[in-house]
């Protein structure tokens, strides 16, 4: 896959955390993986939005209570997993 060199301005704390996680491995590879994950998520959300619009066209508007319920589920999916406590 072709690569392109870019200049980015990123949060210093996030970059420090990434460097700590990747160690001697490539910082570029870590950022590239994060961008790929973000792009995949955005594509997925766009596909869901498209599907919802199609469903509304076919079946009418979704009741507000249903939209709120679905939003809570999506928010739960998007939340970071709870940290496990280590014992022992």
Image (cartoon, helix red, strand yellow):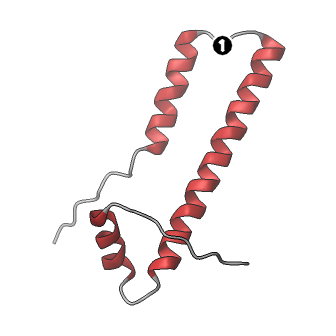
Residue situated furthest front in the rendering: 7
In the rendered image, which quarter is residue 20 located in?
A: bottom left
Residue at 55% across, 11% down? 64
Mark 1 neighbour density, 10 Å: few (under 14) some (14–19) many (20 or more)? few
Does residue 32 sit above or below 56 in this rendering?
A: below
Residue situated furthest bottom in the rendering: 24
Residue at 45% across, 36% down? 75
Mark 1 secondary-structure assignment: loop
Q: Position of residue 85 (x, y in %)?
A: 22, 60
Residue at 28% across, 59% down? 84
**Does residue 88 appear left or right of residue 45 in this picture?**
left
Quadrant where the C terminus lies? bottom left
Residue located beneath label 1 in the image: 62
Residue at 72% across, 78% down? 2
Compare residues 68 and 32 and report the one nearer the observer. 32
**Does residue 34 appear left or right of residue 55 in this picture?**
left
Compare residues 49 and 72 and report the one nearer the observer. 49
Q: Position of residue 28 (x, y in %)?
A: 50, 78
In the rendered image, which quarter is residue 22 located in?
A: bottom left
**Does residue 4 appear left or right of residue 57 in this picture?**
left
Does residue 20 sit above or below 75 in this rendering?
A: below
């Amino acid at each position: 896959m072709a690569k392109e060199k870019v200049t980015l301005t990123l949060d210093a704390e996030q970059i420090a955390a990434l460097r700590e996680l990747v160690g001697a491995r490539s910082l570029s590879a870590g950022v590239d993986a994060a961008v790929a994950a973000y792009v995949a998520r955005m594509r997925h959300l766009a596909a869901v939005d498209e599907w919802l619009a199609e469903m509304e066209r076919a079946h009418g508007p979704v009741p507000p209570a249903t939209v709120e319920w679905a939003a809570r589920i999506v928010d739960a999916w998007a939340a970071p997993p709870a940290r496990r406590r280590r014992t022992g």
